[in-house]
Amino acid sequence: MSKIKIIPLGGVRENGKNMYVVEVDELIFVMDCGLLHPETELLGIDVVIPDFTYLEENKARIAGIFLTHGHEDAVGALPYFLENIDAPVFGTELTIELAKIDVESTGLAPGFNNYHVINEKTEIEFDNVTVKFFRTTHSIPDSVAICLDTKEGAIVYTGDFKFDQSATKMYRTDFGRITEIGQNKVLALLSDSSDAESIEENVSDLRVTEKIIDTFNNAGGRVIVSCVASNIMRIQQVFDAAYQTRRKIFLTGSKLIETIDVAIKLEKLILPSKEVLVTEKDLSKYRDDELVILETGQSGEPIETLQRMATNKHKQVNIKEGDLVYITTTPSTAMETLVAKTKNMLYRAGAMVEEISDNLKVSGHATPNDLKLMMNLLQPQYFIPVQGEYRLLAAHAELANEVGISFKNIFIPGKGDVIEYADNRMRMSGQVPAGNVLIDGIGVGDIGNIVLRDRKLLADNGIFVAVVTISRRQSKILSGPEIISRGFVYMKMSEELIKESADITTKVVEENLEKKDFDWATLKQEIRDSLSKFLFEKTKRRPVILPIIMEASSYVKE
């Protein structure tokens, strides 16, 4: 009997950062290696990635990294993983090319070239495990699910998926393959929970294309389309709609152009005509009602770019009277406030704003009926909902119970939880190191809770600096105190407060200079305590207080 462990290192109880580890005897299989774009409270943090500690400790046992699709929540953390772990990477053609772009752009794994292109028919043999794949429908082509065939049954990870009966050939789900896998024993299913709470069904992508065409036809001026760069399906729909409505497309953003170039080269994105794309210098040749501006980015970047356009800060295109801004990606709950603020800015700049989600239920993720269909086709013995916050995982667990899976066979794990199959039974059996690693610039994991707390304090209450130069030999202050405030009070309007703060600092310094057991740390702490108490009494705010005490290096004779 094989010993099997399933360990989510990310992607559970959160939206993004998908990474799931399956151990079969001595081999480790890693499925997806994604990142998470931070919420606003992670001040200054660029991205969040999984904690690779457990995998680094067991890197000799890693059989490979298997990727489901090319979105950043599945491949974005790969450069940081490959920096310290040399393991083969498996994925479909487009997924591998997008992963290469991410790895090469960071420079973290120079020279790495251990990539292996697979397709839905590929089978890879390992000791006691055969890795198989099947096509799924998502908002990017070349999306697949992963099936690990073991002696105890198959372990299936769906990746991001939905069902769309009218999907084009490039995006079509392989129902036959799913049925074939389900006819054999499926031990455990790890399934996408991102839309498990939805009360509406997704419309077909055929209807989405029709809606975009209708929007372009009815717009009297330029149409500025906002979407995520990796949403290849939406970009294809915009291309097709522009061609059918005789509009030209101008692309903004290097990330978009790079992604489109790769997709066109691999024939995963089809240009209806070479003439549909125009350059910036050609924009003046066309009337406003002949133009589509396609602007994209990562996660919330398209919305932030719209803000720059609305305030005339964009390098290429700015909003003007008569523009229609068309937001074609459904924003997450966390971004609703940002979207509302952006729409207000766009209206003030003279534009009209439409969101595709105003009229249609559009998502790249399975709704409840799709989720239940996947479970009925695969008939898993055990079920593990993944990819979503806790409420979504719990909603998915309820759906699993509705199709006949007992709650005792359903596991809602946290990051690092070990779900082990042994003695013909699956159970929670422990934990491994797991959590969030914060990326800030070139720093990986060097930003922790204390630094984030200080950044929040600085953002909320500002900084208050007291600078003093002293001579311990003379036991006197040579210059200062000089008070500097940033983000706390406006100094020109707070002269009395600044003067009193200087007097308090002077008193504390002079008292310490008179002591025989003078100590730098004690002096600075007493300044902080005294100023903190005084400033809170006066303002009811607590800025970060930074005493800077300098000592004269030479004796100055009077």
Image (tube, rainbow, N blue to C red):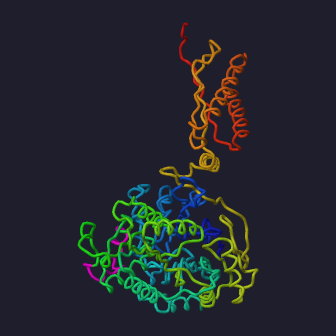
Q: Is residue 326 left or right of residue 553?
A: left
> Residue 357 appears at what percent x and percent y?
52, 80
Kindly identify the residue that appears in the image at 47 percent across and 50 percent down.
Answer: 442
Q: In this view, does 535 lie above or below 56?
A: above
> Residue 435 appears at what percent x and percent y?
63, 59
Q: In this view, does 93 lie to the left or right of 461?
A: left
Task: Please provide the residue range marked out in magenta.
Answer: 257-275
- Foreground of the two, 341 or 526: 341
Kindly identify the residue that appears in the image at 60 percent across and 44 percent down.
Answer: 462
Is residue 265 a member of the stretch shown in magenta? Answer: yes
- Foreground of the two, 389 or 301: 301
> Residue 80 appears at what percent x and percent y?
49, 58
| Displayed quadrant of residue 331 | bottom right
| Displayed quadrant of residue 181 | bottom right
Q: In this view, does 46 lie to the left or right of 274?
A: right
Q: Which residue lies furthest to the top in this view?
A: 558
Is residue 259 a member of the stretch shown in magenta? Answer: yes
